[in-house]
Image (cartoon, rainbow, N blue to C red):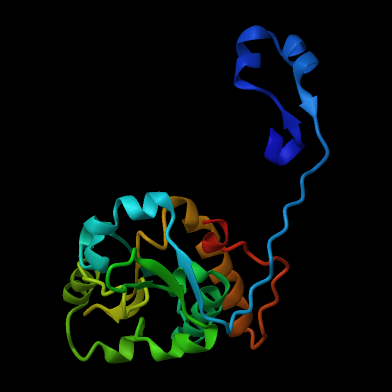
């Protein structure tokens, strides 16, 4: 109610005003709240602390080595996909969403920190693997390896994207993201931005973005 209609109702109001009419009398209509965040320079490397919840499981993830925190997706593609355009679209998404280009910064006798690499540094990391790199290995084998991949989050981006074909010629997309950068609430945002960018690139156009996303490390 508050997010979509600017109407504020307290939990207690539902008990104190058991009918819709009574609830309407205690509901408060407020002016839309516009939140602003500073625009970040995407070419500037950023160092930031981890949130409290991130720190609580820092020992468990073992710098990304623990694959129990992997979030794997495998999609069977029903239509032809331009892998090069998809690669470029995903670069745009990584540029937009800093968690996808965040590494761990480990220093002696200090708490781990977040290190957001510059957008131009994305090309220095291996995270995208086109089907041309399959080299005869079976799709099942590669997809299984991807799901169990052990990340090194000090030196490796928290995601991997791989295209493969099976022996029937069917095209598959493997998308693996580590939980430090992603959760189930992020899926819609990621897929929406990815589809938007891909749609533009296959049409030979540069994607235009109407919004600038807030970044997680800005609120820590």
Question: Which residue is rendered at x = 72% and y = 28% of the image?
Answer: 8
The residue nearer to you, when weighing 28 against 218, is: 218
Question: Which residue is rendered at x = 64% and y = 88% of the image?
Answer: 204
The residue nearer to you, when weighing 97 against 114, is: 114
Q: Position of residue 44 (x, y in %)?
A: 57, 82
Q: Position of residue 117 (x, y in %)?
A: 47, 80
Tell me where residue 110 sits by quadrant: bottom left
Q: Is residue 156 at least partly visible in the picture?
A: yes
Q: Is residue 28 left or right of residue 54?
A: right
Q: Position of residue 21 (x, y in %)?
A: 77, 11
38 lies above or below 18: below
Q: Is residue 41 left or right of residue 121?
A: right
Name of the residue lying farthest toward the right: 31
Q: Quadrant of the N terminus?
A: top right
Q: Is residue 78 at least partly visible in the picture?
A: no
135 lies above or below 188: below
The residue nearer to you, when weighing 45 against 108, is: 108
Q: Position of residue 83 (x, y in %)?
A: 44, 84
The residue nearer to you, when weighing 190 against 150, is: 150
Tell me where residue 7 sits by quadrant: top right
């Amino acid at each position: 109610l508050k997010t979509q209609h600017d109407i504020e109702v307290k939990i207690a109001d539902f008990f104190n005003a058991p009918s819709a009419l009574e609830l309407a009398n205690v509901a408060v209509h407020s002016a839309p709240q516009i939140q602003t965040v500073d625009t970040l320079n995407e070419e500037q490397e950023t160092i930031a602390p981890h949130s409290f919840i991130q720190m609580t499981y820092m020992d468990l993830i073992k710098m990304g080595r623990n694959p129990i925190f992997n979030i794997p997706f495998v999609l069977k593609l029903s239509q032809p996909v331009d892998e090069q355009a998809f690669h470029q679209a995903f670069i745009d998404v990584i540029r937009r969403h800093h968690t996808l280009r965040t590494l761990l910064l480990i220093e002696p006798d200090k708490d781990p920190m977040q290190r957001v690499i510059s957008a131009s540094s994305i090309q220095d990391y291996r995270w995208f693997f086109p089907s041309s790199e399959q080299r005869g290995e079976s799709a099942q084998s590669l997809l299984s390896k991807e799901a169990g991949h052990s990340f090194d989050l000090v030196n490796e981006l928290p995601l991997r994207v791989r295209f493969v074909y099976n022996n029937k010629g069917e095209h598959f997309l493997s998308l693996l993201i580590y939980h430090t950068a992603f959760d189930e609430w992020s899926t819609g945002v990621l897929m929406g931005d990815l589809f938007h960018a891909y749609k533009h690139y296959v049409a030979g156009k540069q994607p235009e973005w109407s919004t600038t996303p807030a970044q997680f490390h800005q609120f820590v």
